């Protein structure tokens, strides 16, 4: 039950850290470069906050908050029914976990999160691969909770 999600999380975290390493080595010295003209730039940012720069400079609070969220996520992951119908819930939780740990690694070892993707066509914060994991994971989980997963009582009514 835990092996495949653990391997997936390690791979996802590794991919996130590899892209951040590439940004540190190649992008930090130049600051920014155009990847897809008018659509996507690569812009090196040292993010010392969380989403949209909230709690900027409060590293230990952010680390504590991330730790608590991660423990709660693991607890609920362990409590999920082992049935096939919850596989997408488990996958979304792995994405959220991998994103949280990827950014937590940055905060612990660098004191900031490496962000580098920037949409050129809208005013949107610069983000990274771990952020993508979290956003996709949260959207999928919210969709499943709101529209797919039914309470046992609702299942009985539908049958």
Image (spheres, grey):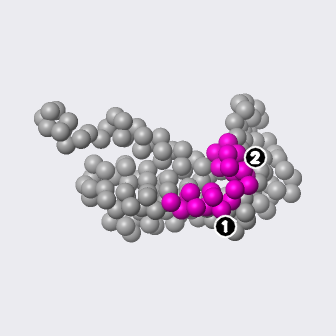
Residue drawn at x 69%, y 68% as measured from the top left: 109
Mark 2 Cα-neighbour bin, 10 Å: few <14, some 14–19, many ≥20: many
- The part of the chain drawn in magenta is 47-68
Quadrant in the picture for residue 120 = top right
Of discs 2 and 1, which sits in the foreground? 1
Work out whether 37 lies above or below 105: above
Nearest the eye: 103 or 30:
103
Please tell me the numbered disc located at residue 108: 1
Residue placed under numbered mark 2 in the picture: 42
Mark identifier at residue 87: none
Q: Nearer the viewer, residue 125 or 56?
A: 56
Q: Is residue 35 visible?
A: no
Using the rendered view, name the quadrant where residue 18 is placed: bottom right
Would residue 26 be found to the left or right of residue 53 on screen?
A: right
Judged from the image, the secondary structure of the residue bearing numbered disc 2 is strand
- 68, 79: nearer the viewer: 68
Query: For the point 50% across and 60% down, which residue is it?
Result: 68
- Quick one: 61 or 2, which is closer to the camera? 61
Is residue 149 something that shows in the picture?
yes
Taking the spot 60% from the left edge, 49% from the top edge, the residue there is: 131
Q: Position of residue 100 (x, y in %)?
A: 56, 57
Is residue 63 part of the magenta span, yes or no? Answer: yes
Residue that appears at 36% across and 36% down: 146
| Spot occupied by residue 155 in the image (x, y as percentages of width and height) | 18, 38
Residue 62 rendering spot, x and y as whole percentages: 62, 57
Q: Is residue 25 magenta?
A: no
């Amino acid at each position: 039950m835990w092996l495949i999600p653990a391997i997936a999380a390690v791979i996802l975290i590794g991919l996130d850290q590899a892209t951040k390493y590439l940004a540190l080595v190649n992008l930090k010295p130049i600051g920014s470069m155009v990847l897809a003209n008018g659509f996507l730039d690569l812009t090196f940012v040292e993010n010392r906050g969380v989403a949209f720069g909230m709690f900027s400079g409060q590293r230990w609070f952010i680390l504590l908050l991330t730790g608590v969220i991660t423990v709660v996520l693991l607890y609920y992951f362990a409590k999920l029914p082992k049935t096939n119908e919850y596989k997408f819930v488990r996958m979304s939780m792995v994405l959220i976990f991998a994103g949280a740990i990827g950014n937590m690694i940055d905060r612990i070892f660098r004191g900031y999160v490496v962000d580098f993707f920037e949409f050129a066509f809208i005013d949107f914060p610069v983000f990274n691969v771990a952020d993508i994991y979290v956003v996709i994971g949260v959207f999928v989980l919210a969709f499943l909770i709101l529209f797919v997963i039914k309470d046992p009582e609702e299942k009985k009514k539908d049958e």
